[in-house]
Image (spheres, rainbow, N blue to C red):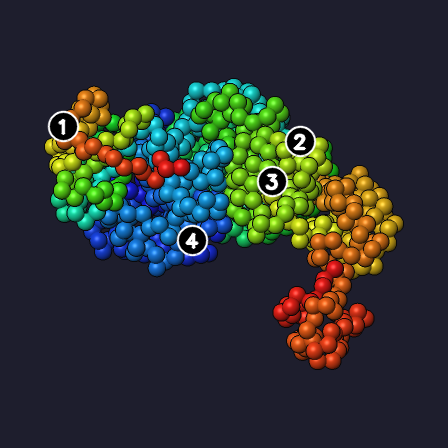
């Protein structure tokens, strides 16, 4: 361990360290973030959901997009795997099908950051358990 | 470097470790390795989450899944289902006792909804043995800002403005304490952290030191800069081995980074800490006794003044603060005095950590804003009384405090309201009692503790408390008379007025407060010779209800002293003179024919 010699060094060190804690900081206030859920059931994994998830996580970290990626179980759209659900705060969740790494980046850049709609949205007609009260 | 997609936070506090959380960590790690997920998921040992009732806790972020009562054999399933496939393990989720629904996200648990975590901000969030995680959360930034850009007086003014009061029990304004110590002139001054936590049922200081030791070290250094001290000492009980271990690791890491030692961050300010171990005497939590004990003398209090701020450890000015007080300090400097004083009530700012114990559903550690009501703490956060019984009282302030009853449920909790209600904040232990608890026995329990812990230096405490205990013993064994109650009251007042230190001056509080709030219960013991709660063994009266007794003779065989007689298939009778009130017949009877009064 090297000694920290000044307050500036301490601040720089903090900046280098904080990205590893980001995932925990984000979990503190998930409501204010874009929540992306990757369907990670057997069929999803088989069609490459894990790669998609890695891409999402890396892009979000690199561009400092205020979003958090979690895993979900099977959503039932096995014909369109890998699928991801994107919940922008204040909006209804949107499900995208047939997502590969390139589409994942498109979704982040166009839908999440710029708010444009993309093709390939699966219309949802279900209620989640959180809505049923 | 690969980015972890999930963190598995495992509670490494003393409570959860006692339920095998270390093995859980190992099992999680090995299963993650088996499945080749080392780059996806990271296992982190953290401090206490507070929800000790349902430990061991494993929390998974970023989805905030809160697994309770995890066993080592559950780990494979958690990793295979949740980490690999994204399916939460339902059976391990916390179940809301009212709706019986599994709660997936800890944000939705009643236990956490009303809490504001300042002193516990890092507990259950960072790895206490890794200084980098503390720095990543702005650790040592407050110290850095102060020693490079503020005068000691400016920093003290912020402390005064924040309104922080001592969390160890007394509630003395921390900023003023620092100011007094800063004005004393001496070649050497000392900062002491009082980690001699001793109230029955209180464990917040231990949890802070186990979960976030750096916040205490940082605050001690800040205090050192403010009062002009270069040496800090943590006085900690030897029976907190895990807290000691983590504190030592933390100090070693801080020194390696140069955040303790000479010329910190090039500011010219030097500070370092050392540890002293207490042998677990309650009186050593009193600051003058603590200082005596640190000097290697008997842990006996001395008369104030002189206050430690003028003449303390080795005769030098010494500032003593409690662990929780210190844990608040870095947050105050980072977020500002106005932020801190916006939380709480007019005269009690910020939050308070309480240890919930006794007959409450959610035993654990909580941090709530001052001014919250007892009802919110007990029934919302605490989940109400165990087994659907009726709330009777809550004891706050430990052996120095008193009981609060149903009529206090809606009183906002702060330093002054608790004193007005005949109790005190103390270090924050809250022992909840239900209808089965006898208040005379409760007073007796605390007196037993005080008699045991009295250092014996002054007569009122040494002899007076012993007498109080004897009378309570007499009442509980059914030999009390009405005059005993007045005698208790008088003696209590004398002890309060004449004892030397805080321990003796407050030790009669449990007696006075139970007499005040439960006078009828005392009267029932001495006049009718019954214990309304049915807890004093000597006052129980066992009789057989003839219309319910079938004469099965089960009780006759259970009775160890042959006090029950009667013919087969005829109602039996208990000879009250022979009966030793053991309750064996009551437990054996299948027809609820034994009546207890």
Separation of disc 2 and disc 3 at Cα? 15 Å
Q: Disc 2 is attached to a residue of which chain?
A: B
Observer-side mark, 1 or 4, equals: 1
Asked whether the viewer can see residue B360, the reply is yes
Separation of disc 1 and disc 2 at Cα? 62 Å
Give the mark, 2 or 3, whose residue is nearer the N terminus: 2
Q: Disc 3 is attached to a residue of which chain?
A: B
Determine if marks 2 and 3 fall on one subunit. Answer: yes
Observer-side mark, 1 or 2, equals: 1
Separation of disc 3 and disc 1 at Cα? 60 Å
Determine if marks 3 and 1 fall on one subunit. Answer: no
Query: Circle 4 — which element?
Result: loop
Residue ID for mark 4: B69
Query: Circle 3 — which element?
Result: loop
Residue B505: give x, y in percent of width and height: 74, 41
Determine if marks 1 and 2 fall on one subunit. Answer: no
Image point (16%, 44%), residue name: A78
Residue ID for mark 1: A119
Give the mark, 4 or 2, whose residue is nearer the N terminus: 4
Corner quadrant of residue B137: top left
Determine if marks 3 and 4 fall on one subunit. Answer: yes
Residue ID for mark 3: B427
Observer-side mark, 2 or 3, equals: 2
Compared across the picture, whether B237 is left or right of A56 comes to right
Dot 4, crowdedness within 10 Å: few (<14), some or many (≥20)?
Answer: some
Query: Circle 2 — which element?
Result: helix
Compared across the picture, whether B457 is left or right of B427 comes to right
């Amino acid at each position: 361990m090297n000694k920290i010699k000044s307050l500036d060094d301490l601040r720089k060190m903090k900046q280098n360290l904080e990205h590893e804690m980001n995932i925990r900081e984000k979990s503190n206030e998930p409501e204010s973030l874009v929540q992306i859920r990757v369907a990670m059931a057997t069929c999803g994994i088989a069609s490459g959901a894990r790669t998609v998830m890695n891409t999402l996580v890396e892009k979000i970290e690199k561009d400092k997009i205020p979003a958090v990626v979690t895993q979900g179980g099977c959503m039932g759209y096995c014909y369109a795997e890998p699928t991801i659900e994107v919940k922008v705060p204040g909006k209804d969740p949107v499900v995208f099908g047939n997502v590969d790494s390139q589409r994942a980046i498109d979704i982040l850049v166009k839908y999440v950051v710029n708010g444009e709609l993309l093709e390939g949205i699966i219309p949802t007609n279900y209620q989640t358990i959180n809505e049923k009260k | 470097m690969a980015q972890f997609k999930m963190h598995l936070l495992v509670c490494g506090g003393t409570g959860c470790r006692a339920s095998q959380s270390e093995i859980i960590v190992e099992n999680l790690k090995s299963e993650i390795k088996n499945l080749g997920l080392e780059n996806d998921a990271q296992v982190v040992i953290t401090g206490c989450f507070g929800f000790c009732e349902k430990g061991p806790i494993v929390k998974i972020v970023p989805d905030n899944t809160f697994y309770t009562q995890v066993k080592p054999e559950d780990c494979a399933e958690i990793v295979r289902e949740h980490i690999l496939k994204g399916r939460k393990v339902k059976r391990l989720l916390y179940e809301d006792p009212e709706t019986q629904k599994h709660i997936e996200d800890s944000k939705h648990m009643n236990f956490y909804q009303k809490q504001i975590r300042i002193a516990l901000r890092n507990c259950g969030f960072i790895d206490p043995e890794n200084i980098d995680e503390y720095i990543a959360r702005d650790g040592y930034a407050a110290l850095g800002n102060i020693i490079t850009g503020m005068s000691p007086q400016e920093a003290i003014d912020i402390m005064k403005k924040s309104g922080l009061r001592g969390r160890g029990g007394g509630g003395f304004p921390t900023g003023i304490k620092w100011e007094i110590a800063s004005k004393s002139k001496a070649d050497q001054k000392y900062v002491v952290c009082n980690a001699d936590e001793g109230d029955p049922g209180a464990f917040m200081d231990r949890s802070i030191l186990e979960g976030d030791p750096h916040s205490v070290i940082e605050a001690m250094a800040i205090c050192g800069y403010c009062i002009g001290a270069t040496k800090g000492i943590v006085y900690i009980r030897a029976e907190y081995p895990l807290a000691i271990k983590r504190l030592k690791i933390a100090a070693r890491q801080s020194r390696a980074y140069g955040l303790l030692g000479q010329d910190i961050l090039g500011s010219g300010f030097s500070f370092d800490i050392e540890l002293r171990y207490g042998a677990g005497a309650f009186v050593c939590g009193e600051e003058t006794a603590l200082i005596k004990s640190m000097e290697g003398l008997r842990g006996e209090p001395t008369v104030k003044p002189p206050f430690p701020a003028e003449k303390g450890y080795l005769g030098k000015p010494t500032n003593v603060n409690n662990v929780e007080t210190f844990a608040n300090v870095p947050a105050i400097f980072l977020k500002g005095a106005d932020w801190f004083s916006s939380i709480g009530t007019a005269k009690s700012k910020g939050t308070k950590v309480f240890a919930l114990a006794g007959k409450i559903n959610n035993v654990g550690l909580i941090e709530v804003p001052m001014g919250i009501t007892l009802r919110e703490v007990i029934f919302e956060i605490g989940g109400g009384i165990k087994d659907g019984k009726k709330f009777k009282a809550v004891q706050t302030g430990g052996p120095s405090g008193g009981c609060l009853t149903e009529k206090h449920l809606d009183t906002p909790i702060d330093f002054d309201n608790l004193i007005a209600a005949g109790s005190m904040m103390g270090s924050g232990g809250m022992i909840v009692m239900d209808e089965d608890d006898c208040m005379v026995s409760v007073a007796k329990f605390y007196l037993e503790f005080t008699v045991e812990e009295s250092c014996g230096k002054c007569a009122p405490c040494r002899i007076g408390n012993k007498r109080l205990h004897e009378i309570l013993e007499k009442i509980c064994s059914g030999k009390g008379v009405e005059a005993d109650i007045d005698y208790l009251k008088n003696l209590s007042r004398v002890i309060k007025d004449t004892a030397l230190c805080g321990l003796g001056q407050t030790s009669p509080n449990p007696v006075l407060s139970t007499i005040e709030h439960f006078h009828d219960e005392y009267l029932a013991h001495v006049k009718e010779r019954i214990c309304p709660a049915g807890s004093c063994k000597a006052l129980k009266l066992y009789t057989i209800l003839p219309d319910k007794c079938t004469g099965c003779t089960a009780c006759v065989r259970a009775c160890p002293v042959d006090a029950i007689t009667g013919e087969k298939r005829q109602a039996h009778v208990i000879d009250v003179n022979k009966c030793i009130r053991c309750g064996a017949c009551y437990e054996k009877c299948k027809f609820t024919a034994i009546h207890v009064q």
